[in-house]
């Protein structure tokens, strides 16, 4: 069974640990670099990306995690985690940095200007392909995706789920609803079977 670390700086850590376990992985919160390096994959939870950035910077994790991801470590980010995996960021706080890894431009709080949080069914090309109940909380969207990025989901024409090789990102929070297809996909990516 792969061991997946959930970056435990801030955000929905416990929910991701439970979702990963339900999806067939061993999951644990990780905070120190050796724990992160020892994991087979990394989940970056939703929360607040400016806080994740500041804490990662303060704990000297920003560049090491950036290097691990650039070196091929599988990673999945939801919401603020999607922002952290973006190579380019719009509407970030001054100086805000990300881990990067996915060749995409993400607009922070993109849905938030219209309505802060909502849940609706979205089209998702994951597992059975059935509509997915997606919870959006001051969510970003993908404004532009490079040629190597596979779009897995859209909502009203906006890109809200992507994959680039072993990197997966959703604008919504699959850890907050019972449908485990997104976590199952990430576990299979970590196992190398997808
Ligand atoms: N708007 C938040 C940010 O900038 C993300 C919100 C979330 O993760 N639910 O990080």
Image: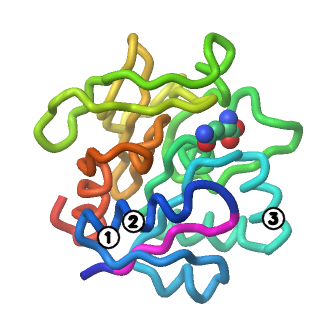
Q: Which residue is mark 2?
A: 18
Question: Which label's residue is closer to the chain start, 2 or 3?
Answer: 2
In the displayed structure image, the side of residue 36 where residue 27 appears, left or right: left
Q: Quadrant of the N terminus?
A: bottom left
Q: Residues within 10 Å of mark 3 (few under 14, many from 20)?
A: some
Question: Up-down: is 1 above or below 82?
Answer: below
Instruction: Give x and y (percent) for residue 97.
Output: 75, 49
Q: Decide: marks 1, 3 in contact (CB < 8 A)?
A: no
Which colour assignment does the render follow?
A: rainbow
Q: Nearer the viewer, residue 12 or 171?
A: 12
Q: What residue is disc 3 on? A: 57
Ligand 1 found in image quarter: top right
Vertical relation: 68 (above or below) 45:
below
Classify mark 3: helix, strand or loop: helix
Q: Magenta residues?
A: 3-9
Residue to which mark 1 is pinned: 21
- What secondary structure characterizes most of the magenta part? strand
* Side of 64 where 17 appears, left or right: left
Left or right of 62: which side holds 133?
left
Q: Secondary structure at mark 2?
A: helix
């Amino acid at each position: 069974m792969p061991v997946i670390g959930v970056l435990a700086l801030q955000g929905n850590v416990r929910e991701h640990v439970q979702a990963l376990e339900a999806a067939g992985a061993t999951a644990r919160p990780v905070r120190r670099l050796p724990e992160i390096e020892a994991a087979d994959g990394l989940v970056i939870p939703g929360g607040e990306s400016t806080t994740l950035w500041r804490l990662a910077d303060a704990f000297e994790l920003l560049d090491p995690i950036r290097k691990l991801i650039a070196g091929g470590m599988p990673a999945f980010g939801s919401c603020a985690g999607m922002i952290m995996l973006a190579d380019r960021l719009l509407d970030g706080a001054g100086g805000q940095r990300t881990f990067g890894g996915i060749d995409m431009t993400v607009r922070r709080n993109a849905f938030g200007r219209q309505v802060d949080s909502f849940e609706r069914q979205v089209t998702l090309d994951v597992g059975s392909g059935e509509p997915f109940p997606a919870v959006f909380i001051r969510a970003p969207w993908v404004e532009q995706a490079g040629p190597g990025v596979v779009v897995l989901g859209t909502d009203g024409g906006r890109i809200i789920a992507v994959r680039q090789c072993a990197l997966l990102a959703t604008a919504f929070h699959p850890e907050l609803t019972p449908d485990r297809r997104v976590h199952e996909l990430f576990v299979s990516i970590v196992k190398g079977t997808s």
